Amino acid sequence: MTRPAGAAARPAGAEAEWTTRRERGSVFLLRSMAVLSLIVGRRAGRVILHVIAAYFVLFAPQARRAATDYLRRALGRRPTIRDRYRQVMTFATTIHDRVYLLNDRFELFDITVAGEELMLGCVRAGRGAFLVGAHLGSFEVTRAIGRQRPDLRVAMVAYEANARKINTMIAALNPALAQQTVALGTLEAMLRVRGLLDEGAFVGMLADRTPGGEATEVVQFLGAPARFPIGPMRLAALLERQVILMLGLHCGGNRYRVVFERIADFSGVAREQREAAIAAAVARYAARLESHCREYPYNWFNFYDFWAR
């Protein structure tokens, strides 16, 4: 996967499309869902998910158009209504499973891990690394791995608006859970991230979209040019750290597959080679996402036009 000829990193629009979408739901709804789900159990709680999934398939036209476009690219054929329903149901399932994962109900799930030795190698070296995810599968199941192992410290960083939403969501689902997300955008945040890495912690962030105004790299993704933010890779390059892809892919039922793959290592990159290394890392990140999208097509949760110019 390479950049289109002549393409270069350049600023995205002032405001990305996904940031203009009003999110459905509320803190009250999240708390209600958490209480109900913990009382009735995962199997009974899933019944209502089918109603929610059907509603969004039928009455969310913008998301439906975007999902249809994505599925056509990932599946290599025209998606059926069953395909579109399955994607939305997979999304609803991962949101519902957050309730149990954030309350340490790991026994409810069958989680397999690929690439764990890559993480353990970083732990043994005592040097932190960046974990880059995407809106592909469940990010919460990857954080569950860290909470099950006392030798793995994982901190989440995000853009300020997203950090507030994540912290609000976590507080709604489990008010007793002491987990904060570092909001990027200030020198203090940068110093905090550096401190976490120096302590041997992993710093997790999503790297497939930006709220706008940030430099992006254009790469081929599922057959067409798409913009990916370069900020996460640039931060890793500035701090001279390794970048590891992490995905928690839903495989149906209560099964998840957690994947760790090395994307880049900026620890030995000279300053004059940094920009080229960043571009190569973004391209490799997009290539690995494409591969997983084709293998687990219903795990893609960017319900907007990802290929918009």
Image (cartoon, rainbow, N blue to C red):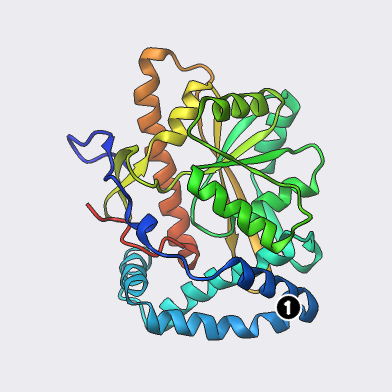
The x, y position of residue 262, in whole percent, is 54, 37
Determine the image quadrant of residue 173: bottom right
Residue drawn at (35%, 65%), measured in percent from left and top? 70
Q: Amino acid at mark 1?
A: Leu
The residue most toward the left is 6
**For mark 1, what is the residue?**
36
Q: Residue furthest front?
A: 28
Q: Is residue 299 above or below residue 89?
A: above
Could you tell me residue 197's position as x and y percent? 65, 27
Q: Between 185 and 294, which is closer to the camera in this rendering?
A: 185
Q: Note whether 251 is above or below 261 in the view shown.
A: below
Q: Nearer the viewer, residue 101 or 277?
A: 101
Q: Is residue 199 left or right of residue 259?
A: right
Q: Is residue 203 above or below residue 61?
A: above
The residue shown at (73%, 76%) is 37
Classify 69 as above or below 192.
below
Q: Is residue 251 visible?
A: no
Q: Position of residue 97 (x, y in %)?
A: 67, 67
Q: Position of residue 25 (x, y in %)?
A: 53, 70
